[in-house]
Image: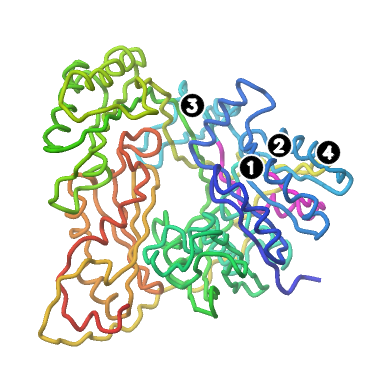
Amino acid sequence: MPADRIVIANCGGFWGDDPTAARRQVEGGPVDYLVMDYLAEVTMAILQKQMARKPEAGYATDFVAQLRDVLPTCVERGIKVISNAGGVNPLSCKAAVEKLADELGIGDRVRVGVVLGDDIYDRLDDLMAGGQELANMETGRPLSDERANVLSANVYLGAAPVVRALELGANVVITGRVTDTGVTLAPMIHEFGWAADDWDRLAAGIVAGHIIECGTQCTGGNFTDWQKVKSHSNLGFPLVEATPDGTFTVTKHPGTGGLVSVHSVSEQLLYEMGTPQYLAPDCIARFDSIRLTQDGPDRVKVSGIVGEPPPEKLKVSVSFSHGYRAFGRLLVTGPDTLAKAEKVADLVWESAGGTALFEDTCTQFLGWNGSHPPLTDSEPSEIIVQVAVRDPDDKKINDRFGVQVVPRVLGSVPGITVLADQGRPRASDVVGYWPALIDRASVPMRVVVGDDEVDVPHLDLAAAAPAGPAFTPQSPPRPSAGRSGATATVPLSRLCLARSGDKGDTSNVGVIARSDAIYGWMVDHLTPAFVKERFTGICKGEVERHEVPNLLACNFLLHESLGGGGTLSLLVDAQGKTYAQYLLAADVEVDQSLLDGVE
């Protein structure tokens, strides 16, 4: 019999998240599934390097450490665990978990399932020879241009192989590069018996996964209205209470810190979003269909989600070596802090042979313009001068740049010192990110559970249910705010909330209106041109806007705004995390009536 309700608990949004989260989620109240996300694009390259040095490595070892705290309780209470902690070596991770279970005396009660097939690193040459060009989705360049430098290549798989592992009796499922949303969608499919082409329900599972995949970012962490969060201590990780019809509630355990509100969930929905058509291997989820309702304290009901058939191809995340980079930092203090800082930076580059000697350089003053232009005219009393360089030649970086930073402490301006943990800068590897597409048929999926191994077929899209009627997002009523005759100049934060994040070299900034009237104003006035001007000198490409009226939101994509993105970037904020707050600090002139009733 299908379940009538399950509780899915997230306990980690990245490799390095709170190590106590799993224990707190298991001990905090009833849960049926424990899911955690460990993988990012750069993480895959790091794991591939680890496995090259040590064949049994290549997975997120923190996963095993967290399981030590909770595995006996999970077995006792029937809580199943799903994680992409397998990285590039899921079978080795499986062996480590089975060893842990034996050490804990529960080896006979732990059945570990592993999803395989995402790692195509060893198959790249055959795939390319067979016609899979794996062209860069952003530039169109074929992967053959960088083949010699490739470090890892992994296909984003969906929920289907995870579901199969659960069907085979696994109570711990380990995957490689399964989508962040797939680990949450899979238990819903398994427990509720959803069909592989039930697009609306599958889309609901994807939305649920997106909301909780970043841990506490939906429960009060990184929230614009942070002052409304009563406590950031013991911040509650998110729970999804899911039902068979696809509606679900986002909440957290009682007695934990944080806040679950329509606004906190809306911000997370917009995080790292592109167009409102959210693409996943399982289906396309229409983020412009989502309905959010406050359903009590720290409870948000999510409904109305529309899904469509998935894209024909799967996405591939390829990482490649792209030379080296180094950072140097010095502390400069006042008076005349800015003049001193500029002098120090000039001296570093002059001593190193000039900025033109290197492939790319960057100078930023942390405490003044480190992540965005200054918000004040008041000169700071102290600044960290950050000088950064990227180049294919690590020897040049070390011998020309690295040796010239610290000597400026004795040979430049007064009131300068080197940070206690900042020695001579040294070149470190730079990893580039290469997004591509691949035919589904070129990616065989397998599942290993215990000693059993089975193939998992891809969904036959030709035989799957067609999309429903074309979905048209419904705009909310745009009531006139009236005309008071008086105007007010206020920071945009009085009118809106926002959240920002990265996708390669593109930063997204999702902006949410605080009322229907403000949404109408925002559509008319918060234009791509406005955002482009605000980010002058930061956004070097176009600004693209997508309206998401159901969330009273607009999502802006700032192309070429992150210095190449990921570990290519020399910027302090290479992921655009600070961009939303900078946009919200912009002063706008509005009719006073627009502020009526806005907290």
Q: State if disc 2 and disc 1 touch (CB < 8 Å).
A: yes
Spot occupied by residue 146 in the image (x, y as percentages of width and height): 42, 25
Rounded to the nearest whole Å, what is the CA distance between mark 3 and mark 2? Answer: 23 Å
Q: What residue type is labelled 2?
A: Cys
Q: Residue furthest right?
A: 108
Label 2, residues with CA under 10 Å away: few <14, some 14-19, many ≥20: many
Residue 470 can be seen in this image: no
Q: Which amino acid does label 3 sit on?
A: Val
Q: How many badges with numbers are in the image? A: 4
Q: What residue type is labelled 4?
A: Glu
The residue to which callout 2 is attached is: 93
Residue 310 can be seen in this image: yes
- Mark in front: 1 vs 4: 4
Extent of the magenta region: 154-174
Label 1, residues with CA under 10 Å away: few <14, some 14-19, many ≥20: many
Q: State if disc 2 and disc 4 touch (CB < 8 Å).
A: no
Q: In this view, does 436 lie above or below 328?
A: below
- Mark in front: 3 vs 4: 4
Magenta-drawn stretch contains 276: no
Instruction: Answer with left or right where residue 404 lies relative to residue 283.
Output: left
